[in-house]
């Protein structure tokens, strides 16, 4: 059974809630799913990762939440090269912050692509000004993403 790893960057639990809500969709598609709410680079590269999903909220002025900062720092410093990694990204933000809207997700996306990882499809950006519960947008997006990227294995 292929492994999907969900990496969470969250301050108040919203991104973790999204991860927990979408997990069953991937299990139904035939994946073993692991959620990492204190992710490390070793969680990504230490064991095979068939597919990854990043659920990341933005804090402050476009900053990464504290729990995923060590992961991003190690990714940047160690430059492990992620040419075989396929991933998706759900970014949570608030458009009232202007230019820094979904800044953490955009930063992480650029960091992953810079390491050679391949994002499948478009990044989902959820705006707290328009959507009270992020999973209201994330669930249909994940369903569509699984279909559009032909990720179903079961």
Image (cartoon, helix red, strand yellow):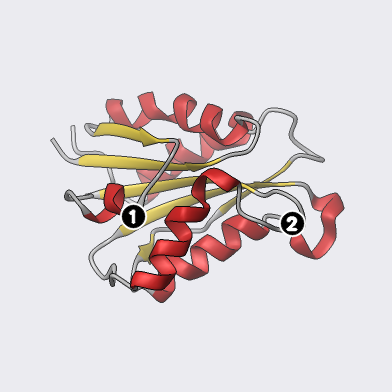
Residue 33 circle label: none
Q: Secondary structure at mark 2?
A: loop
* Residue positioned 35% across, 66% down in the render: 118
The mark that comes first in sequence, 2 or 1, is 1
Q: Give the vertical position of 136 relative to 5 (above or below).
A: above
Whether residue 56 is visible here, answered yes or no, is no
| Circle 1 Cα neighbour tier, 10 Å, few/some/many (<14 / 14–19 / ≥20) | some
* Residue positioned 34% across, 73% down in the render: 79
* Relative image position of residue 3 (x, y in whole percent): 21, 40
User: Whole-Å distance between the Cαs marked 2 and 1?
Assistant: 25 Å
Q: Which residue is mark 2?
A: 101
* Relative image position of residue 14 (x, y in whole percent): 62, 31
The C terminus sits in image quarter = top left
**Left or right relative to 109: residue 91:** right
The N terminus sits in image quarter = top left
* Relative image position of residue 21 (x, y in whole percent): 48, 25
* Relative image position of residue 40 (x, y in whole percent): 36, 49
Q: Which residue is mark 1?
A: 41
Given contact means CB atoms under 8 Å apart, are the residues at marks 2 and 1 in contact? Answer: no
* Residue positioned 51% across, 70% down in the render: 110
* Residue positioned 82% across, 40% down in the render: 129
């Amino acid at each position: 059974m292929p492994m999907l790893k969900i990496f969470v960057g969250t301050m108040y639990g919203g991104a973790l809630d999204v991860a927990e809500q979408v997990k069953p969709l991937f299990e139904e598609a035939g994946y073993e799913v692991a959620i990492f709410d204190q992710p490390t680079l070793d969680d990504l590269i230490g064991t095979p990762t068939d597919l990854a999903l990043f659920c990341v909220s933005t804090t402050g002025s476009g900053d990464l939440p504290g729990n995923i900062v060590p992961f991003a720092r190690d990714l940047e410093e160690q430059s492990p090269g992620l040419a075989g990694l396929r991933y998706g990204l759900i970014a949570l933000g608030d458009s009232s912050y202007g230019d820094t809207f979904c800044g953490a997700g955009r930063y992480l996306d650029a960091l992953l692509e810079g390491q050679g990882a391949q994002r499948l499809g478009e990044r989902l950006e959820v705006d707290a000004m328009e959507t009270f519960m992020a999973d209201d947008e994330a669930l249909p997006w994940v369903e569509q993403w699984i279909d559009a990227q032909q990720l179903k294995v079961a």
